[in-house]
Image: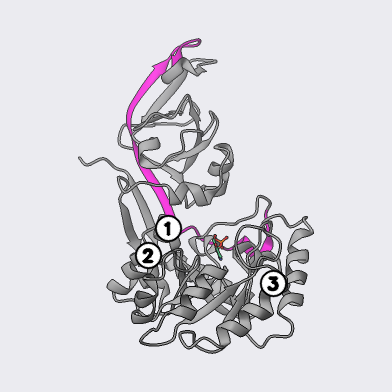
């Protein structure tokens, strides 16, 4: 029998989540973010499903865009970090990609390059996150230079990115929206700011284009329940199986470092998934898993290829029973919190050792 690990993908859920995103921002175009192998789900699988429904896709860099074009995806694709070297601009033009301009260097490369056809640019403004983008007082200058550049098609989009939109109590998002609105007020270009938390929680951030990623994969970016996030459906369900069940007497320790000791006579199931498969090593004892649909706590340290679960409270647990680590019935964000991380990291860092399998088209 093959090792039972699978990251099962439900593409119907993906389409449902995109439809929800559209309904929440009905007056905006939608750019689906599929960078980093579609947050670990599989770039070509996800982008092929989303391309007919989205107005554009977004990736981090040209290699990710080339992979999608080679798979036959013809939808516009934006490079969120733009190009890293001027030589990339030829490929950008040839493949009809869109590119971000977030600094003087990238603008100068465009000004100095002759391309077979002009490229569509997104001008990124630093409205307060202080990670990437030009200063608000430089926007007119950059915009005018872009408009005057032969290699750039008319009317660049003006964009920015939020640092704290997942924190609905923070005033920073309103401040960023104000800064962005003021900096772009006199310019005719279309505007874009909202990531998933912006789309779900900050309607005033929708502007002309929304750019959701995380929510499309069915996960809420908020730590608290939010009405707009309630009907999201997880796209990935990570599954494994039980390969051993044993009785452990009171006071006996389980796993590496003897980090967990049985407080009572316990039944311990060993599940064949570990940090080598993408399950987070930091997950603490008590992190829930689903055994045949019922919650049971992880106990002891996560190994490279195995975890141990306390199934004392469950009836009739057998070798071969299915275990769900996150996804349908067990929110990714809940597991991530128990491992002191975010769901984005868990799916994105999942190695190829764990097969992605489309189970529902
Ligand atoms: C510029 C930009 N826009 C949109 C997104 C999508 O964000 P989220 O996955 O939170 O929707 C990202 C992701 O980090 C991003 O870098």
Q: Is residue 78 visible?
A: yes
Give yes or no for contact between labels 1 and 2 (Cβ–Cβ under 8 Å).
Answer: yes
Check disc 3 and report the residue beneath it: 205
Check disc 1 and report the residue beneath it: 36
User: Which residue is at the front of the view, 258 or 187?
Assistant: 187
Q: Earlier in the sequence, mark 1 or mark 2?
A: 1
Mark 3 → mark 1, Cα distance in angstroms: 24 Å
Quarter of the picture containing the N terminus is top left
User: Which residue is at the front of the view, 80 or 29?
Assistant: 80
Give yes or no for contact between labels 3 and 1 (Cβ–Cβ under 8 Å).
Answer: no
Quarter of the rendering containing residue 302: top left
Please tell me whether residue 176 belongs to the stretch shown in magenta.
no
Residue bounds of the magenta highlight: 225-254
Query: What secondary structure is marked by label 1?
Result: helix
Quarter of the rendering containing residue 306: top left
Drawn side of residue 224 relative to residue 288, left or right: right
Query: What secondary structure is marked by label 3?
Result: helix
**Residue drawn at x 66%, y 62% as measured from the top left:** 162
Residue projecting furthest to the front: 112
Q: Is residue 359 above or below residue 244?
A: below
Query: What secondary structure is marked by label 2?
Result: helix
Q: Quadrant of ligand 1?
A: bottom right
Q: Which percent across, then down, holds residue 97?
A: 41, 77
Check disc 2 and report the residue beneath it: 64
């Amino acid at each position: 029998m093959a090792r039972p690990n699978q990251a099962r993908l439900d593409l119907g859920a993906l389409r449902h989540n995109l439809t929800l995103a559209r309904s929440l921002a009905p007056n905006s175009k939608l750019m689906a973010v599929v960078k980093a192998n579609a947050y670990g789900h599989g770039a070509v699988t996800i982008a092929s499903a989303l391309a007919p429904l989205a107005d554009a896709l977004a990736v981090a860099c040209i290699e990710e865009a080339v992979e999608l074009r080679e798979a036959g995806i013809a939808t516009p694709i934006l490079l969120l970090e733009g190009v890293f070297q001027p030589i990339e601009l030829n490929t950008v033009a040839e493949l009809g990609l869109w590119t971000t301009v977030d600094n003087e260097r990238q603008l100068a490369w465009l000004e100095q390059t002759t391309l077979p056809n002009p490229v569509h640019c997104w001008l990124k403004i630093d409205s307060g996150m202080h990670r990437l983008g030009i200063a608000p007082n430089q926007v007119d200058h950059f915009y005018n230079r872009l408009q005057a550049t032969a290699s750039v098609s008319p009317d660049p989009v003006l964009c920015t990115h939020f640092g704290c939109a997942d924190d609905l109590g923070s005033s920073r998002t309103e401040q960023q929206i104000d800064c962005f609105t003021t900096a772009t007020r006199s310019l005719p270009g279309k505007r874009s700011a909202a990531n998933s938390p912006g789309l779900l929680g900050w309607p005033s951030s929708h502007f002309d284009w929304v750019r959701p990623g995380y929510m499309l994969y069915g996960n809420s970016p908020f730590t608290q329940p939010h009405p707009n996030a309630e009907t999201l459906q997880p796209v990935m369900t990570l599954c494994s199986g039980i390969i051993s069940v044993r009785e452990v007497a009171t006071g006996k320790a389980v796993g590496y470092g003897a980090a967990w000791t049985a407080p009572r006579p316990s039944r311990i199931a060993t599940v064949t998934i570990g940090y080598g498969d993408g399950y987070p090593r930091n997950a603490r004892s008590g992190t829930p898993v689903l055994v045949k649909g019922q919650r049971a706590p992880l106990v002891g340290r996560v190994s490279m290829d195995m975890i141990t679960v306390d199934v004392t409270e469950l009836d009739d647990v057998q070798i071969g029973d299915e275990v769900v680590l996150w996804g349908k019935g067990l929110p990714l964000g809940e597991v991530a919190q128990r491992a002191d991380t975010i769901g984005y990291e868990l799916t994105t860092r999942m190695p190829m050792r764990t097969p992605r399998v489309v189970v529902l088209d």
